[in-house]
Amino acid sequence: MTSNKLSTQINELLSSQINDLNAIIESNSAGLKAANIHLRAIEYLLTDKPTKAMSSFNSANVEYENINIIDCTPSLLKAKGDCILGGIIYSNVYENDLVMSDFRPDPTLAFVYLWLSFELSHMTLFSSLVSLSELFLFFTEGNMIMISGFIQTVPPSHFPEFFSVVCQYWRNVHVAQAMRSLGAGETRYLKELNVELSESEKEKKLFYQLEIDSANKRIKELARVIEDKYCNLMPNLKGMDYEKMLAAIQQPLSEDESVNYINLFLMMIRNMRKSSAGEKITNLFKNIPMSLDEVFKNENYYGLFTLVYADMYNKKNKKSDLEVSKELFKYAIRYNNEWKYGIAFLVAEEALVFDYTNEKIDQFIEDVNLKLFEREVGIDLSDDSLF
């Protein structure tokens, strides 16, 4: 059941969403009615029935929007984002025969639902990153997300398709971390332990490896897409391959801009948490159903950041940059005291963003990085004889 008008990638993406929706339907929980309508919308789109598809996406979206974020599971949040993405796919693929509808797919809302589903899952719902990756391939919608995240420049120098690669990169990073941590009884940030895995852990390892292979395959495909689209503007994209693509998102954008696309992606989310995309978006971050104890225990640093400074400029939640930095640094110190050096490093780096001249945090980051290498790799970087 595939549409000839949709690309192979979109057909595969929509088909994978059917499995996610069936799981929501089988659970018979909140979102049951919306998921059933959403499922029909996908089936209509896959069988080239665009008018029925758009009507169903619209109806599903109305049902989803009646469900408060505090009642959402990670899967339900992802379904809400995927429903809007379905409308975006429709409006781009069938742009010459659009059906007039009250449904105006909001790409920023889709982005936030998909990202928050990843946060709420404690960074285990990797399919959310897949949907995010496809969302950024639509140029107009991708630019709208960047503007909401307050990172666009005029004339534009940032291209949304590069964020498609960033999402696959994060998918790779988080899956690899989950795989390194198997059998360790702790989160491993650099190196896995040489331990015997249980049968269930072996099955998970196979699943993780397939996820990594899929992410790598998609990055290679995106390298070709980006080369074809932008090599006339950026000659250095000629001959773009997997390694060059990863380098392109990690290197400074130019001599004048020290940030890279990975920095920009995190900056975009940071700005939305604070207030850049308006009250509706910041309220989603502010009201996500997580507790500080829960995110701290799960080493969910994205969730921690959201709970610490979402909507920080609101009168009822007024916090200065310095106050946010102190609060994050407090959690970094707690992690350090529990010998969780990898997460301590990541939280301290975010604290430094809000107080970038703080020498104490800067030194803490250096110290905890040394401890991480000692603990996980067995290398003492303070030993001068190594260099």
Image (tube, helix red, strand yellow):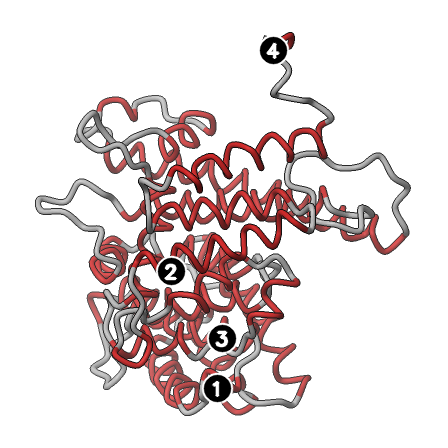
Q: Is residue 46 left or right of residue 294?
A: left
Q: CA distance from mark 4 to mark 1?
A: 64 Å
Amino acid marked by disc 2: Val
**Residue 314, percent from left and from top:** 26, 76
Identify the mark at residue 77; answer none if there is no mark.
Answer: 3
Q: Looking at the picture, does residue 262 appear above or below residue 377?
A: below
Label 2: which residue?
Answer: 324
Q: Residues within 10 Å of mark 2 (few under 14, many from 20)?
A: many
Label 1: which residue?
Answer: 37
Tell us which disc is closer to us: 2 or 3: 2
Amino acid marked by disc 1: Ile
Q: Nearer the viewer, residue 273 or 18?
A: 273
Q: Earlier in the sequence, mark 3 or mark 1?
A: 1
**Residue 147, percent from left and from top:** 20, 58
Q: CA distance from mark 2 to mark 4?
A: 36 Å
Q: Earlier in the sequence, mark 2 or mark 4?
A: 2
User: In terms of secondary structure, where does tag 4 sit?
Assistant: helix
Q: Residue drawn 31% across and 64% down?
A: 272
Q: Earlier in the sequence, mark 4 or mark 1?
A: 1
Amino acid marked by disc 3: Leu
Q: Nearer the viewer, residue 320 or 140?
A: 320
